[in-house]
Image: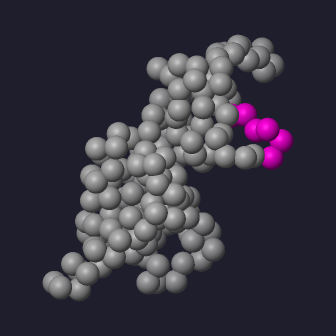
């Protein structure tokens, strides 16, 4: 479980610091919540409250280890899942992967959605692609002590490697 001062990753808000643990009461429901402070500037000094009971299903997690980054990038190089069949179901699965907070699943979603870029994506699906890619960029940059541009280059290189391998087939 997280401790005050820990650095964690929130699937929608990126890198955060566990600021405190508080009792929170809404209506007649009282529960303990983790208070997370996003590391990037946010409007109104945003704090994220995540109930202790739901922390495992919220997607909030410790950053991956530096040694795992190569494995995450390797996911981008594998053959993508075809989302064109049963399109809505494919995008629902991608959305689930993104919201899981699991960096490997986010990498799968990026790979699969990038594959769909060749087909026209509507703006909602394009936004869906940007979310996991931002998550990958931010976590890789944090773990490897890179700029976001350098992390994005690593991701793009892995995706291009996959494309080159597919063309050779």
Residue placed farthest to the left in the image?
Answer: 169
Above/below status of 1 relative to 49? above
Q: Residue at x 53, y 32 (%)?
A: 7
Residue 142 shows in the view: yes
The one of 3 and 122 positioned closer to us in this rendering: 3
Q: Main secondary structure of the magenta part?
A: loop
Q: Position of residue 20 (x, y in %)?
A: 65, 20
Above/below status of 166 relative to 16? below
Q: Residue at x 41, y 49 (%)?
A: 144
Residue 91 shows in the view: no
Asked if residue 40 lies left or right of residue 7, the reply is right
Which quadrant of the view contains residue 44? Answer: top right
Tally of numbered discs = 0
Asked if residue 57 lies left or right of residue 75, the reply is right
Q: Is residue 36 magenta?
A: no
Residue range in magenta is 43-48
The one of 98 and 20 positioned closer to us in this rendering: 20
Q: Residue at x 55, y 64 (%)?
A: 130
Q: Pick the quarter of the image with the C terminus.
A: bottom left
Q: Is residue 44 magenta?
A: yes
């Amino acid at each position: 479980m997280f401790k005050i001062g820990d650095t964690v990753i929130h699937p929608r808000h990126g890198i955060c610091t566990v600021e405190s643990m508080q009792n929170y009461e809404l209506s007649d429901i009282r529960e303990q919540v983790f208070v997370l402070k996003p590391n990037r500037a946010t409007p109104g000094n945003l704090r994220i409250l995540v109930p202790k009971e739901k922390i495992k299903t919220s997607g909030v997690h410790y950053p991956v280890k530096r040694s795992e980054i190569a494995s995450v990038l390797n996911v981008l190089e594998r053959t993508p899942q075809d989302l064109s069949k049963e399109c809505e179901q494919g995008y629902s699965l991608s959305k689930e992967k993104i919201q899981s907070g699991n960096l490997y699943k986010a990498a799968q979603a990026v790979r699969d959605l990038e594959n769909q870029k060749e087909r026209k994506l509507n703006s909602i699906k394009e936004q869906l692609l940007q979310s996991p890619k931002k998550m990958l960029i931010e976590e890789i940059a944090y773990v490897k002590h890179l700029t976001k541009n350098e992390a994005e280059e690593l991701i793009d290189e892995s995706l291009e490697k996959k494309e080159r391998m597919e063309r050779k087939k």
